Image: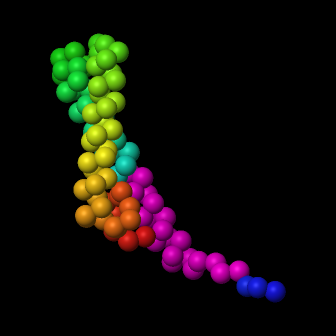
Amino acid sequence: MSEIDLPSPGDVVKTTAAYVKDLSERVLSTFVVTAAGVAVAAGPADMFHASFWESVAAGGIAAVGSLLKGLFAKNVGEKNSASLVKGA
């Protein structure tokens, strides 16, 4: 019968900490990029009355911002991740 290879408790805590950092980073960066996209697309004074196309433009700006953040993170964090978190 084969043995089950379970991670040690230290590995689980380390992985959980990296996950929490990664998730926090992604939530915060999504908020910042989306808010900036709305401000640029609709204008800061009119951002709560954006038209359909301004809303679409804000989504596009947020998508491009997330892409740029992911490309930047590849050079700063783990090479095969879009996160700035180093190690897992």
Q: Quick check: 79 above or below 6?
A: above
Residue plotted at (34% across, 52% down): 25
Q: Is residue 55 left or right of residue 16?
A: left
The image quarter in which residue 47 lies: top left
Q: Is residue 19 above or below residue 5?
A: above
Which quadrant would residue 9 be assigned to in this image? bottom right
Report x, y in % for residue 37: 25, 31
Residue 38 image point, x, y percent: 26, 26
Q: Is residue 3 left or right of residue 78?
A: right
Identify the magenta region: 4-24
Q: Is residue 35 visible?
A: no
Looking at the picture, the colour scheme in use is rainbow
Q: Is residue 19 magenta?
A: yes
Classify the position of the C terminus by image quarter: bottom left
**Residue at (57, 80) in percent of width and height:** 8
Identified at 42% across, 64% down, the residue is: 18
Residue 47 lies left or right of residue 17; in this view the side is left
Q: Quadrant of residue 76?
A: bottom left
Reply yes or no: does residue 21 show up in magenta. yes
Is the magenta region chiefly helix, strand or loop? helix
> The N terminus appears in which quarter of the rendering?
bottom right
x%, y% of residue 40?
19, 27
